[in-house]
Amino acid sequence: MNRESLLKKFEEIFGNSEAVRFFFAPGRVNLIGEHIDYNGGLVFPCALEIGTTALARGRNDNIISFASVNFDFRKEISCDRIIFDKNDGWTNYPKGVASVIKNSGYELRGFDVLYYGNIPNGSGLSSSASIEMATATLISGLFDLNIPMIDRVKISKKAENEFVGVNCGIMDMFAIGMGKKGMAISLNCNTLDYTYVPVKLNDYTIVIANTNKKRGLADSKYNERRNECERALSILNNYVKAETLCEISISDFEKYGNKLNDEILIKRVRHVISENLRVKEAISCLSGHNDLHRFGTLMNQSHLSLRDDYEVTGKELDALVEESWKIDGVIGSRMTGAGFGGCTVSIVKNEKIEEFKKYAGKNYNERTGLKADFYETSIGNGSGEI
C-alpha cells in the first residue's frame, strides 16, 4: 500500500489523519551463519526493504489504540495497565514494547497507531521483531524520548522474551535496528561486537522463497540442538578449554572429536565449527575482491551442513534449495532461520529471476504439493522515521 492509501485507512479508523507520522522497521534475513549464535559464532544478517510501516500520532490521554491493515483485530489499552493476554493476538508484541519502555523509566503517553506489514507471517523473516522495533521507534520519536537504537533493540528483545514469552535471541532486532543499505552485519550475538560489510550484488538480486511449510518442529528441535551443543562442549572441555564451541579450532576438533563417543554430537559440533569458518570466509571474500560466486558456494555448503550435520532442514526446504541449485544463474541458495519450514535465500542473476521463480516453483510444487512464494528484495536501512 502506498502512503495515500495508508493515510485513508488511518482516517477510516481514527477519524482523521492530522499530525500523523510514518515510521518503518524492516524485516531481516540471515545470509549465512545459522544455529551458531548461541555457540559463540558470528551471524551475518542484513535488513530488507520489506517490513512494517507504522502510522502514529500522540493523544492527549493515556489510551493506546492499536490497529492493523493486515488483521481485523483491534485493541485499546491504558498506559496504566499493560498486560499479556493470549486473546489479544498480534497486539501483544507492541504492547510488550510499550510495557518495557514504561518500566524502563520513560514517560509513556497515549497514541493511535496503524500498522501495515508486507513480511509473510511465519516465514522466518522476523515479522514479530519488525513490529516490535517499529513500535519502539515510533514511541521514541513521537514523545522525543531519544531512546538510542541499541536500547530499542534490547527493549524489543526483552518484550519478546519476558512479555510475550518467546525465547528468541538478539540477532533479529539488531539487524532490524542497525541495518544499513547495501551492507550486511558481522555480529557476535554474545558481545554485540559488529562490523558492516558491503554486499555489492551488481547484476544479481537476493530472492527469498517461502516454502509455506509451517515450522512446527522448530522450537522443540531448537531446544534439542542447544542441549546437544552444551553436552558436547562439556565433554570437549576435558581436553580443550573453551567457553563456546566456536572457540574450538578445527584442528582441535579433529584431534578430540572422537572423545564425544556419539556420532550425533560429532555431527552437531562439526556443523558449528565449520559454519563459523564459513561466515568468516564469507566476510573476507565480500570485504576483499567482492567474490560473490565464492560467497554463493559457501551458502550452498552451509545448507548441506544444516541438512546433514545439524539436521534442521526438512524435506520442503531441501526440495526448494535443490531445485534452486538446478537453475542457471543461481550462484547460491540455502535455508535461512530456524529450519523445518520458513524460507530459503538465494542469489540470482537478474536476467534469470523469472526463470528461477517459474521452474524452481513448479518443481517444488511437484515434489511437495506446496506452492512457494518468491520475494525479490534488496538490502535496506534499519528502523527509523520515514
Image (spheres, rainbow, N blue to C red):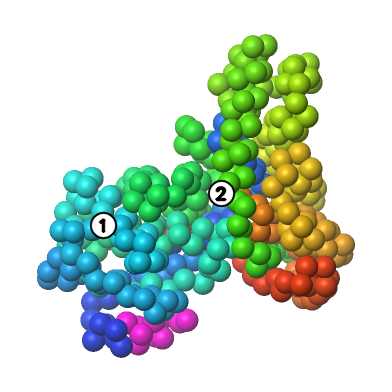
Residue 323 seen in render: yes
Asked if one can make out residue 270 in the rendered structure from this viewpoint, the answer is: no
Q: Position of residue 373 (x, y in %)?
A: 67, 72
Question: In the depicted view, which residue is nearer to us: 228 or 124?
Answer: 228
Quadrant location of the C terminus in the rendered image: bottom left
Query: Residue at point 41% right, 70% down?
Result: 53
Which comes sooner in the sequence, label 1 or label 2?
1
Which residue is at the far left? 60
- Return the x and y of residue 236 as percentages of the image width and height: 66, 18
Instruction: Please indicate whether residue 116 sits to the left or right of residue 296 in the image.
Output: left
In magenta stretch: residue 6 = yes
Q: Do the residues labelled 1 and 2 touch (CB within 8 Å)?
A: no
- Relative to residue 120, is residue 373 drawn left or right? right
The relative height of residue 253 versus residue 348 in the rendered view (above or below) is above
Q: Residue at x 32, y 82 (%)?
A: 10
Q: Residue at 51% of width from left, 58% of height from top?
A: 126
- Point out which mark residue 219 bears: 2
Q: Which mark is residue 128?
A: none
Q: Which amino acid does label 2 sit on?
A: Asp
Element type at mark 2: helix
Q: Position of residue 268 (x, y in %)?
A: 71, 34
Main SS of residues in magenta:
helix
Rendered location of residue 227, percent (x, y) = 59, 33
Residue highlighted by disc 1 = 83
Other-residue count near label 1 (Cα within 10 Å), few / some / many at <14 / 14–19 / ≥20 = some
Residue 181 in which image quadrant: bottom right
- Give the residues drawn in magenta, as a range: 1-10
Say above or below: 370 vs 284.
below
Instruction: Judge the density around disc 2: few (<14), some (14-19), many (≥20) Cα neighbours within 10 Å.
Output: some
* Quarter of the view holding residue 151: top left
